[in-house]
Image (spheres, coloured by chain):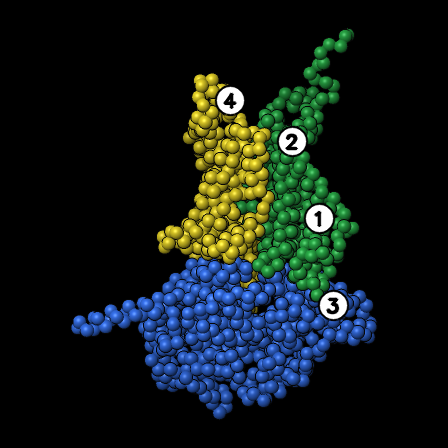
Amino acid sequence: MNKMLWSGLVLTSLASLAGAQTLRIGLAEDPDILDPSLARSFVGRIVFASLCDKLVDIDEKLNIVPQLATSWQWASDNKSLTMKLRPGVTFHDGEKFDAAAVKFNIDRHKNLPGSNRRGELLPVTSVDVVDDLTARINLSAPFSPLLTVLADRAGMMVSPKAAQANPANFGTKPVCSGPFKFVERIAQDRIVLERYPNYWNKSEIHFDKVTFQPIVDSTVRLANLRAGQLDLIERVAPSDVAGIKADKKLSISRITELGYQGITINTGKSDLAQKNPLGRDPRVREAFELSLDRAGIVKVAMDGEAEVGNQWVPPGNAFYARNVPIPKRDVARAKALLKEAGVSNPTFTLMTPTTSDAQRVAQVVQAMAKEAGFDVKIQATEFATSLNLADKGQFDAYVLAWSGRADPDGNLFSFYGCKQPLNYSGECRPQWDDLLNRSRTTLDTPGRIKAFATLAAETVRERPIIYLYHRNWLYAASNKLTGLRPIPDGLVRVQGLKM
Amino acid sequence: MPRYLLKRLAAILPTIFFVTVIIFGLQQLLPGDAAAILAGENQDPTVIAYLRQKMHLDEPLPMRYAYWIAGVAHGDLGESLRIQEPVLGLILQKLPVTLELASLAMLVALAIGVPAGIVSAVGKDTVWDYAANLFALWGLSTPNFWLGILMILLFSVQLGWLPASGYVSPLEDLKANLAAMVMPAFVLGNAIAAVLMRHTRSAMLQVLNADYVRTARAKGLDERTVVLKHALRNALTPIITLGALEFGTLLSGAVLTEQVFSIPGFGKLIVDAVFNRDYAVVQGVVLFTSTVYIVLNLLADLAYFVVNPRLRG
Amino acid sequence: MNAGPRPLMERGDTPGRRALRRLLRRRGAMLGLAILLIFIVLAIFAPWIAPYDPVAASWSAVRKPPSAEYWFGTDEIGRDVLSRVLWGARASLLAGLVSVCISMALGVPIGLLAAYVGGWTDGLISRFTDSMLAVPFLILAIALAAFLGPSLTNAMIAIGVSATPIFIRLTRAQVLAVKVEDFVEAARAVGNPHWRIALRHILPNVLPPLIVQATLAIAAAIIAEASLSFLGLGQQPPAPSWGSMLNTAKNYVDNSPWMAVWPGLAIFMLVLSFNLFGDGLRDALDPKHK
């Protein structure tokens, strides 16, 4: 008995010597509801990466890797996915994770009032509990993006017991199965998580606590890092990169995002489309695109911290359509196209949210397009208002960025599908819907690449969205932090991080 | 006095009613679909419909006002739809923070403004007068968010003396709490210091020429006693009442300072809620702070009334 | 008939003239006025004095420090900061003046009405004014500016409307004091209609403190515009305004401090000049203050 007591004491003191470490992360915004079904912001996903494990995850190359599920297999008709689950996993309240929990969670994602996952899991009809550690997800039609959807919030698993005990406000005290469990949250101040001792991958976890502090101003966020009050910050301002590189005590990491920054043009959302030559005539849109120097925009507006692009995925992505390369700036051809279209002194209003990078992009675009004869009027609009105006089609062109999804379908379907919620340009073409559906129901990669290539050729011809570039996710951390692996989805994964 | 009190109390009710109308109207008339912005990136139509129903957005304006007021009467200020927490809870959570910031700022203002005002009044038209005046004016003329960022860069990043931002509860760590509050309290306080300086100066000037002061001087008391004991005590009355009013403004108006220093108080809560169209939060918090301001006003009036017997009757 | 001692009160020595002499003697007020006039001149002649086009971007000159070529340096898309500061004087001066004009145009008549008519009208107006004053000024301005849309014009309207209750209250208090004066009684006895009494007899006598308040309010309005721009609700780029320049510059304070120093300094000096002048004006107009 004494021996056990002593070894226990030694072990605990060793642990407190080695551990008792808190990882302090600075976020760019305050997260919203910490309920994976109701959550709706990008920044909340960073907290979820430490709090809630999901069925599968993605790696830097966008491959699907196991997390709560260890292997999976599509049925021969591709209308169901059978997943084998990891044994011995428990939720933060001690409850067992099993196929019944998977069924509960998928049902919850689909049926909870106000759930944001319902649309993401539309093709899922039901979940069968094959045995304790095997779940089968049934679909109404083959759905190739399914695994990437399950690598995001729709694949996050919460404790059924806790969810049932607190149906109205689960997000205020979330109980998941990730490496850290929820301790407290003070709105707009901090979110505190502490280590879950029974995490299945605990050897990769080297911190006892993680705190997230939202600091909206990027200068102040960096100042906190410099002053030693934070260990890691996300979304560093591109203009601060040079200064951080020169600082011996800090390190910087980057990776290109899954999303894009672009200009959406009203080509059919409302009558305004016909009233403006930009919305009416694809040649005018081509002239506008040719007047822009994407590399120049990236250099000036983003200090070089972005990758130029002309499609919904970056040029390095496996699904990038190589048949539609990035056009070079050609002001002469732009002017010629305008002449051909019979348009002189084209003018339009560029609706720009009041965020600083949108403003910068708009100003650079305005100056560049002027050389080809375009008179671009920048209309600064508060973001909430701009969404509303875009939805009603009350705009000519709109500077809109998208945070991106791991599967190209996530960057496409809602934007080009007829009557889809994010289709602000108002395009509605049966051939495009056809191609979109084909790319979703085909599971083999070559088939999808073909569908995307055809779609790219089509959409580029019409140009309802002019893609400009893909931003770099920028992280700055104290030099003592090692093991940071940036992933294109922009989330901070705590596995492997140590000080 | 009781009649005066009753009259004033009766006047408060229509004022508070107007406050509710103003703040409700301003929120609900903001452009854009509140449900859409709260629905997040995906803009899922079912989520939007669900939020619209929850916020009663499809019902006429007077009905929505009625829902809200009915809730308020029962102590239910609604819920923040952005993070699913009740507004009253958020208020109680942030109140100590803003209260501490406001108190510290007031302290700074008093510590700078009142002595500056005394010095300026006593040394009227001398270098001291001009210097004190200029110092107070500096406080009024600098945008406080600007001052805040500069101070962070100097004291946190360059010198490392103070934390750059954030808030630590005093119950958790008093030293860290005060360290984090120094810069914001100073930034917020020096604008009020200017106002206090002016009022102290004019109150002191009025009093220094008064009869009882001349009497004190004639009695042979030294200047110091005259100034501190007699003049200041009488000059304090208008300063106190003004201080109470400024405190009320501080309580709800530290908007920009809290943004810059990331202090989780009312100001930050309100601004973020306006941009996120989180109606219930803005309405609830502003109603709360306005009511506090109105009550403080009333108390200041009563204090003035009590201290100044000439006003009675 | 002989030249005796000169009478103390010379002909034409009105209270106004005495106030003016007092004003001219105050060094602080004259300094403030001088600075103010310099800014006004700079603002008016900006198109001719500014070395560059304030909205002309230059890709090769992004964020350059002050040099012989660019006296104040350049900003994040290569525009000359000096030119933008000069042109920005227009926006800031306009923001201050127009906002306060709106406040006075709305506030003075309402305050006059409330105090002159009294009774229920006064009660209603006073309660409404109290409620507007209870809502924090900046919150009111933010909500109004968000409602109207982010632009300089809307920011001016928002600030003007938010500051109106201050003028209502001040006017009302002054009118109440003047209303009972002898000359007003006399005017009434003679049979003047109410509007005449209000406009020709009462109003001119309450103007001095209103003007002092207006001067100080302009200073506050300029800062309010800068604050709204800081939150993204004021003058929008590329048009130059000191507030929006500060808003953009806050992201670059570390590596390009000149982007923020000059507009910040400009705001400070302009607001200081209004405050100095206003203070002097108040001292000059109120003899008891001396």
Residue at horizontal 78 percent and vertical 50 percent from the top: C48
Q: Which residue is the site of mark 2?
A: C26
Q: CA distance from mark 1 to mark 2?
A: 28 Å
Q: Colour of chain B?
A: yellow
In the displayed structure image, the side of residue A207 where residue C125 appears, left or right: right
Q: Is residue B86 visible?
A: yes
The numbered disc on residue C90 is: 1
Residue B197 image point, x, y percent? 53, 36
Tell me the kind of residue under disc 3: Ala
Q: Label 4's element?
A: loop
CA separation, marks 4 and 3?
Answer: 72 Å
Q: Secondary structure at mark 3?
A: helix
Chain shaded blue: A
Tell me whether marks 4 and 3 sit on the same chain: no
User: How many numbered marks are there?
Assistant: 4
Could you tell me which residue is drawn at 59 percent across and 86 percent down?
A: A448
Three-letter amino acid code at disc 2? Arg
Work out whether disc 1 and disc 3 sit on a shared chain.
no
Residue located 74% across and 71% down the image: A291
Instruction: Say what secondary structure mark 1 lies in.
Output: helix
